[in-house]
Image (tube, grey):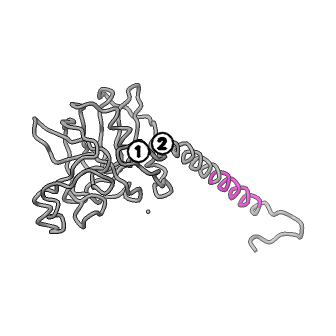
Amino acid sequence: MVIDGAFADLGETGDAGRPGHLHRRAFLIGAAAGVGALGLSGCMSSDARLRREAAAFYGPIPEEKFPVPATDIRKVKTQYLRQTVKYASTEAPGTIVVDPANYYVYRIEGEGKATRYGANVGRQGFLWSGEAYVGRKSEWPTWTPPKEMIQRDPRAAKYAGGMPGGPDNPLGARALHLYQNGVYTLYTIYASRYPATIGTNLTSGCTGLLTQDMIHLYDRTPVDTKVIVLPA
């Protein structure tokens, strides 16, 4: 799996009028422009407000085994910041839904709501969909590139025995490993330290969340949680 670019494969003058006289057409155009400006101002204010509220989610986490710095959310489009959204679903609360087409991961909360996280997802040719479950959870996990990746990118060969967990590890601070029928699918939801990658296709099939979002999801997700990966 090529993740976050760690390897090439690893895997932002009009109408005339008398002097001093406001022509009716000019007035209507001006009024329309004013409404547009007000609308734009409202959007910008809402965007700024959302960023201010979201900033509390993405501060530093110094108590971690490897201290986590604050995420620069200026590099993340507003829609990909953590939010509680309306989401109609018949799935049980706690279920995770990965929507690679729209770069979102949802955690179903019930009562028509979900927590929505922005994500990066797999490139064409590395997309996977289906139902799975969290078979294993890991903090600061070891990353071992599959042999197919090593064949595509020999730079990964030095990690054939596993890259220890740490801030430079492609899997980051947390990972949820997805299984089907007791078999690891190689599909992982992991922590990304590169905010500019959220909302892009760059991995070899895995899904990355901002580190603070991944820790938030990880803490609320027990082993055996159902995961639905939608088609891209």
Asked whether disc 2 touches disc 1, contact meaning CB atoms under 8 Å apart, the reply is yes
* Residue 66 percent coordinates (x, y): 36, 48
Q: Residue lying furthest bottom in this view?
A: 13
In the displayed structure image, the side of residue 67 where residue 175 appears, left or right: left
How packed mark 2 is, by other alpha carbons closer than 10 Å (few <14, some 14-19, many 20 or more), is some
* Residue 202 percent coordinates (x, y): 29, 60
Q: Is residue 74 above or below residue 137?
A: below
Name the amino acid type tagged 2.
Answer: Phe
Residue under the point 35% across and 44% down: 65
Query: Observer-nearest residue: 123 or 139?
Result: 139
Name the residue carrying label 1: 212
Main SS of the magenta segment?
A: helix
* Numbered-mark total: 2
In the displayed structure image, the side of residue 196 where residue 137 appears, left or right: left
In the displayed structure image, the side of residue 165 where residue 47 appears, left or right: right
Q: Is residue 189 magenta?
A: no
Query: Observer-nearest residue: 20 or 180?
Result: 180
- Quarter of the figure that contains the N terminus: bottom left
* Residue 4 percent coordinates (x, y): 31, 59
Residue under the point 44% across and 45% down: 62
How far separated are the C-alphas under marks 2 and 1? 7 Å
Residue under the point 29% across and 53% down: 121
Name the amino acid type tagged 1.
Answer: Gln
Q: Is residue 35 magenta?
A: yes
Query: Observer-nearest residue: 17 or 125?
Result: 125
Classify residue 132 by image quadrant. top left
Name the residue carrying label 2: 57
Classify residue 27 by image quadrant. bottom right
Classify residue 181 by image quadrant. top left
Image: magenta residue range: 27-40
Q: Earlier in the sequence, mark 2 or mark 1?
A: 2
Q: Which secondary structure, mark 1?
A: helix
